[in-house]
Image (cartoon, rainbow, N blue to C red):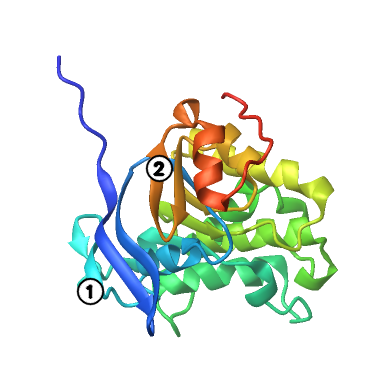
Amino acid sequence: MSVATPEKIIEVTDVSYSYGSGLALEHITLPVLRGDYLGVIGPNGGGKTTLLKLMLGLLPVQEGTVKLFGVDIKDFRDWWKIGYVPQKAVNFDARFPATVAEVVAMGRSARRGIGRRLTKVDYAKVADAIASVNMSAYHDRLIGTLSSGQQQRVFIARALASKPEVLFLDEPTVGVDAAAQGAFYQLLKTLNEERALTLILVSHDIDVVASQATQIACINGHLICHLPPKNFNASEYIKNLYGKDITFVVHDH
């Protein structure tokens, strides 16, 4: 009996990108399979966020190709399949007078189409997204009254409201208090394992990536490695990434 090969839902092939005369990424080839929890690590300025934006279509592909669900990104239209949680600090003004439900409903509107009235089914999906991040008790609370960790859960719920098949997160714990980070990362692991949601996480938290992700991609201008955590040799790859030895312990799943 043959075992089906997991679907490649994102294919980055021989991609290079420059800002003016500065080369940010060089010949990156990186597949993402359905069900992966891919952790992307590397130094500041190493190209992690640039790679993320290329996969999201926020930057134009200059060299190479990017495909989403088998379609060249230039022709891709099913953007509801893609969820995106950028850094909260640059994404949302917490003083905005909106409730948790209203913020999450913005994600549902993205699937329905701007200007279209939400239906009972849409509001049920909003409630389900809020429940999936354990924030049902805060359904009618103003977003600005929540802690940083709670706010970031709401932003994940907003991304989940369109029922995406892959969720991108760019340094999602920036501005989140340390006490809430453990629960936040446990939420991501649950979404991946229990809801079969494909995750792509850009993070500086190497320990979290190595202990929770199913695949690690090390980026510093080029792809240094792409492998499962059990094969991640800290002493070999960390020095190539950061240019120096760093004391680091990898925890297995």
Front-most of residues 200 and 49 = 49
> At 15% from the left edge and 19% from the top edge, which residue is drawn?
2
Q: In the shown orientation, is residue 69 left or right of residue 39?
A: left
Q: Dot 1, how many residues are within 10 Å of its Cα: few (below 14), some (14-19), or many (20+)? A: few
Where does the image place residue 134, in percent across and percent down from the top left? 69, 47
Q: Amino acid at mark 1?
A: Lys
Where does the image place residue 232, in percent across and percent down from the top left? 49, 32
Image quadrant for the N terminus?
top left
Where disc 2 sits, the SS reads: strand
> At 40% from the left edge and 72% from the top edge, which residue is drawn?
112
Q: Dot 2, how many residues are within 10 Å of its Cα: few (below 14), some (14-19), or many (20+)? A: some
Task: Farthest residue to the top: give it.
Answer: 1
> At 70% from the left edge and 61% from the top edge, which residue is drawn?
174
Q: Amino acid at mark 2?
A: Cys
Image quadrant for the C terminus?
top right
Where does the image place residue 57, in percent across and percent down from the top left? 35, 72
Where does the image place residue 235, in percent across and percent down from the top left? 56, 34
The disc placed on residue 74 is: 1
Where disc 1 sits, the SS reads: loop
The disc placed on residue 225 is: 2
Front-most of residues 115 and 16 = 16
Marks 1, 2: nearer the viewer: 2
First of labels 1, 2 by sequence position: 1
Q: In the shown orientation, is residue 145 left or right of residue 218?
A: right
